[in-house]
Amino acid sequence: MARPSPLPERIKAVQAAIEAESEPLVTLTHLLQLCRDEHPVLREQLGIPGRHTRVAAMVADLVPALSTAATAALEPAERRAIAAALTVDPTLPAVLVARALVELLDVRYGHGFAASFRRRSPYQPGVGDPIPLDSPDLRLISELPATSPPWRLANRLDETRHVRLAGEWATQFQVIFDYSRADALTGIIGSDTVVATCHPNRGLSEFAFPLDTSGLAFPVGPVDERRQHREIDRLIGIAVAEGASVVVLPELCVTERLAAQLHDWTTRREGPQLLVAGSYHHDDEHLDADLGHPARQRRRNTAVAYLRGCPIPLTQDKHSPADRPVNENIQTSGWPELRVHVSSDGWHLVIAICRDLLNPHAAHALAEAGVNLVLVPAMSETLVAFGGPVAQLVGAGQAFVAVANNPADFSTTSDLTVHLPARALFGHPGFGQQTRLVQPADGEPGVALLRVRTGQLRWLDAGASPSGSTQGDTVELPPWAAGLRRLCGLDPTKTSLPPTELTLRPAAVLVLLSDSSDGPTVLLTERAADLANYPGQLVFPGGAADPGDDGLVATALREAVEETGLDPRTVNILGTLPALALPDSGFLLTPVLAWSHRPEFITSPNLAEVSGLATQALHLPAYPRPTLPPRPSPSDEPTARDPQPPAPAPVIGMVTRVILDLVTGMVARAIAPATTDAFRLATMQPHER
């Protein structure tokens, strides 16, 4: 086993590689690999007070040496400056400087990383290679607040906001990032998207299970192909009438010929943008080049998906044969492939066939690869086992997942009980439990619908009329009214809905007061601009209670330490305020009042959550309001030499304003007697004293 190079030699090698490399993505990768390999030292150094400030100042001195041009190449002088920064101060560990340089390069050049990956498509990373982590802005897609933290809050040392280093999972699977359909996939999920799963079959009797002499089944498929085609067409028609633009069919519900005929749906104006036409069994000739054998037949289970505007379908082979309801006779490749179809707006789409998603190594690889859209054709007698891997994908990458299961009844003639599994399973970042099952009472064919914006789920029996027509009213709705009904997603035959039960999670914020020349001030954090909740707003540090917290005071202190690096030893707890119910976010929020003579910070703020710290003076009668800067005159307007207007000031969050008003009133009342006594003393006549 090769011994790693001594650290000084490693640093010299990294410096040489940086000086020879013009592409920012590759330069960042060299630095990130150094951070990963020396993570024990880096973790230790990040906790030493004052180190971060010195490194930040040194990196700030480097910024003027970097070009401001929107270019994807580093000039020789820039490369030399970056390389030299690693050892310019011998008292600072190079790995600590490397981490600061990583963050600088990611912020400055991260917008161009997607183009770098796209030039390499199809891109198959090895261990230690970079992978893209671009993702869409969920705030523009769903009204529901995310119930799990995004990937970046894990505070990992092998990733940035745009890039992550591939791990050992790259040796278990051929993970391929495919940008060939990046433009066609753009907008595949949006705020108005409806995802539909179609379920055409009632029971196992509608399928053929030919068995060979060893008891293995192949090819499994529908008994009556023509009838199956008619039923699938009818279900897809119901789905698109409900506004579905993404439609998923179950595993083995089609033949190869039937799947090809379904391509017509994505060529129609009213058809879906993406149709996953289930999967089918087929023989495929291939050459065993390693052994030099001639072409031979290989049995495969292949999923196919049609994308509007793309003549060539997306395909994915199954690599985990089923053993229920029959043993599936397919031959898998020795190195399974996971193809990630990347869109121009950050969607990472993967099609996984049934048990492939149950493989824990595959689920881990998908989560590590930043996959955020997974469509799953399935044929399983239960969907309970899918809940774990789907929740993992939702929690790790804020993924949307749709599992289409078939048939409705897995009972056989020898069974004494009826086996009616759930028909569909959906994962959504806004679901409280991250996943939800769709399980109708009967086994009739039907369609399950997920409205991305609201997270609403519906089941439509195949015999039910779509919501575009209402009973007792044949007048066609205007487009805006039809759109409203689609967004509401309510059953027009039901006039009342059961009350919604709401459970609030305990949470706390730290209201840290200090003294200043302007009077009492409070500490606020400026939320990172790309967070799903309260982006760019000034708020109190805080968050949800953890099971290990010793009360809400401990919650507030822990969250403040994690977000700002605050030293809790410099904080004096004063008490708590009445809790505030926040039904929109699902929290019962308790403000914790505290005071500090001079707050100290043992680490830097967590840049994943906080872009900066600020203090806000309480507007008290005893103190003048801070003087606002004068408005700029016309001569101060941006000129051609200064095209960028000043960035807008961050706004204070609504809940934060409520707490500030309450605290201001309490402080004003607390200081009122002292203020009155001082005023009376100053206005007394000499003989009255």
Image: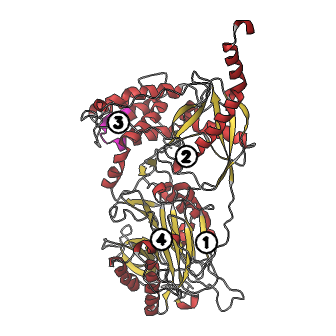
**Which circle, 3 or 1, is nearer the viewer?**
1
Residue 16 within the segment the image draws in magenta: yes
Distance of label 4 from label 2 (alpha carbons): 36 Å
Mark 2, secondary structure of its residue: helix
Distance of label 2 from label 1 (alpha carbons): 28 Å
Q: Is residue 369 above or below residue 80?
A: below
For residue 620, what is the image quadrant?
top right
Q: Nearer the viewer, residue 275 or 140?
A: 140
Q: Is residue 325 above or below residue 590?
A: below
Q: Which residue is mark 1?
A: 437
Give residue 248's position: percent from left, percent from top: 47, 75
For residue 343, what is the image quadrant?
bottom left
Q: Nearer the viewer, residue 92 or 151?
A: 151
Which is more N-terminal, label 4 or label 1? 1
Q: Is residue 462 above or below residue 308?
A: below
Q: Residue at x 66, y 35 (%)?
A: 665
Q: Label 4 sits on what residue type?
A: Leu
Give residue 439's position: percent from left, percent from top: 62, 77
**Which circle, 2 or 3, is nearer the viewer?**
2
Which is more N-terminal, label 3 or label 2? 3
In magenta, the rendered stretch is: 15-26
Q: Which residue is mark 2?
A: 153
**Which circle, 1 or 4, is nearer the viewer?**
4
Which is more N-terminal, label 4 or label 3? 3
**Label 4 crowd (10 A; few <14 / some 14-19 / many >=20):** few
Q: Is residue 86 visible?
A: no
Kindly check if marks 3 and 4 are in contact, taking CB atoms under 8 A apart as contact.
Answer: no
Distance of label 1 from label 4 (alpha carbons): 25 Å
Q: Which residue is mark 3?
A: 18
